[in-house]
Amino acid sequence: MEYSINTSVSIHQTKTAALSAGIFTDGVLSPAADMIDRASSGAIRALLKSEFTGKTGTTLVLRNLPGVASPRVVLVGLGKQSDYTARVHARAEQAFAATCVQLRVAEATSTLISISCPESSVRERARATAAATADAVYHYDAGFGKPDADARPKLKKISAWIGKSDSASAEQGLKEGVALGEGVSFARTLGNMPGNICTPTYLGEMAKKMAKQFKSIKVNVLDQKQITALGMGSFLSVAKGSDQPPKFIVLHYKGKIPAKAPSKTAAKHDAHAKGPIVLVGKGITFDSGGVSIKPAATMDEMKFDMCGAASVLGTFQTMARLGLPLEVIGLIPTCENMVSGRANKPGDVVTSMSGQTIEILNTDAEGRLILCDALTYAERFKPSAVIDIATLTGACVVALGAVNSGLFSKNDALAEALLKAGKQAGDTAWRMPLDDAYQEQLKSNFADMANIGGQPAGSVTAACFLSRFAKAYPWAHLDIAGTAWKGGAAKGSTGRPVPLLVQYLLNQA
Ligand code: BES
Ligand code: MN
Ligand code: ZN
């Protein structure tokens, strides 16, 4: 999608296939809607209340208004004026773009950035505009023998009318939103691909492709032999039940970090030079459950069990496109969890890279078994923060549903920074407990720990398990089991939590 900025004085004279007009519930018109209303002798005000209430996310298409150059004016509901936030803005932009997709227009003009919103800057709203509209035009049809060309969204160009807002800030925001939208789409497509195509090898190839595309990214894809040499016995135990070879993907992003002006305080700062941020993504390209096999009904959805890995790859793409002045490491342990004569069995004991032994009581709790070795590997980077992202537990879906990702951390500053980024990006997380008292549920009679903690607080005991391998640095865990994809008729990957991660990195940069 292409984005441009429109700064014309009279929006009603803009020639465009569809033009948005934002309407609040209290009968208040946005600046653009007001201008269009006056130009058309009150055509909008005439139908407020009776035909359009302005409820958030609703739209109504008006055609051929007198005095308006655009043949279609799309009324977009903005809710109560006093409640207008960046989040409502993003929802409205999404609704407008979705309507334009339905109208099958190729180009449209949105006027929503021009609305004042004390809670957020023009740059933030421009970013949300590009990201939300990219989400609305996302379309996956790679799996069809003959993809239906007519079903593909035609919308290719969005111009944003910014009124009197600062155009440099809007430009910057749009640029960030485009990069974010592309990272999210990339993550969604990887998630949506079937398990027989999106294998560990395929994910490795995608990472290598990204390194070719961006000079700022270096990639090393370790194979089974190298993983064995590292002593990742826990990760390998999951992988050995599959005919697909495992990979351990190591990404290294380094943006241009501006040299700070030399001063006494800067020298002091350098002494505490901060290590890189490490993102760890669960890359189970298919989770059958293993010998503790899953029920058949929705097992197909376990192709999405690599959405943590996809979110790391999507975030790297966005970060490289924006050239953020940061150093970030990405770690992706990736394999299948399958059933075979070589697969893990309940009761097996394996030795992790950290030396701690694990009794595998349930082979379906495999995510933590591959992540724990990646967390140990992360120590070598002396990181300032490690964030793992995983579709880890069904229990997290029970606790939080599809609204919030589960956030677990003992580090308050890191947790607050991630919660804040989630709110800013409209990709929210909810902090969950991590008290030591839950650790007791992981007690094993035959190894240092068991890989499950029983039914109660299943997402917490999973996080507790990981915490035992993340003691050397500030660490946070995002359980995205409920947020990474949707089931049912709208089945598909969401690209979450790429927006949260990108926002967190933008805030660090
Ligand atoms: N990938 C699943 C978690 C999952 C399940 C995500 C359903 C989304 C929907 C994970 O590997 C898993 O199977 N976890 C088990 C853990 C249990 C055996 C302790 C679970 O949640 O049932
Ligand atoms: Mn599982
Ligand atoms: Zn899994």
Image (cartoon, rainbow, N blue to C red):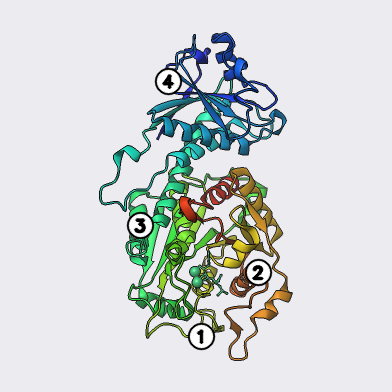
The amino acid type of the residue labelled 2 equals Val
User: Counting residues from the N terminus, which is met first, the one under dot 1 or under dot 4?
Assistant: 4
Q: Position of residue 356 (x, y in %)?
A: 56, 83
Estimate the spatial distance between the alpha carbons at disc 3 and disc 2, rounded to whole Å.
32 Å
User: Counting residues from the N terminus, which is met first, the one under dot 3 or under dot 2?
Assistant: 3
Estimate the spatial distance between the alpha carbons at disc 1 and disc 4, rounded to whole Å.
63 Å
Q: Which residue is mark 2?
A: 460
The amino acid type of the residue labelled 3 equals Met
User: Counting residues from the N terminus, which is met first, the one under dot 4 or under dot 2?
Assistant: 4
Residue beneath the point at 38% across and 72% down: 246
Estimate the spatial distance between the alpha carbons at disc 1 and disc 3, rounded to whole Å.
34 Å
The amino acid type of the residue labelled 4 equals Thr
Q: Mark 1 near mark 4, Cβ–Cβ under 8 Å?
A: no
Q: Position of residue 392 (x, y in %)?
A: 55, 66
The amino acid type of the residue labelled 1 equals Pro
Estimate the spatial distance between the alpha carbons at disc 2 and disc 1, rounded to whole Å.
21 Å
Mark 2 neighbour density, 10 Å: few (under 14) some (14–19) many (20 or more): many
User: Counting residues from the N terminus, which is met first, the one under dot 1 or under dot 3?
Assistant: 3
Q: Mark 1 near mark 3, Cβ–Cβ under 8 Å?
A: no
Q: Which residue is mark 3?
A: 206
Q: Which residue is mark 1?
A: 346
Answer above or below: position of 278 versus 78: below
Given this view, does label 2 or label 1 mark the residue nearer the observer?
Answer: 1
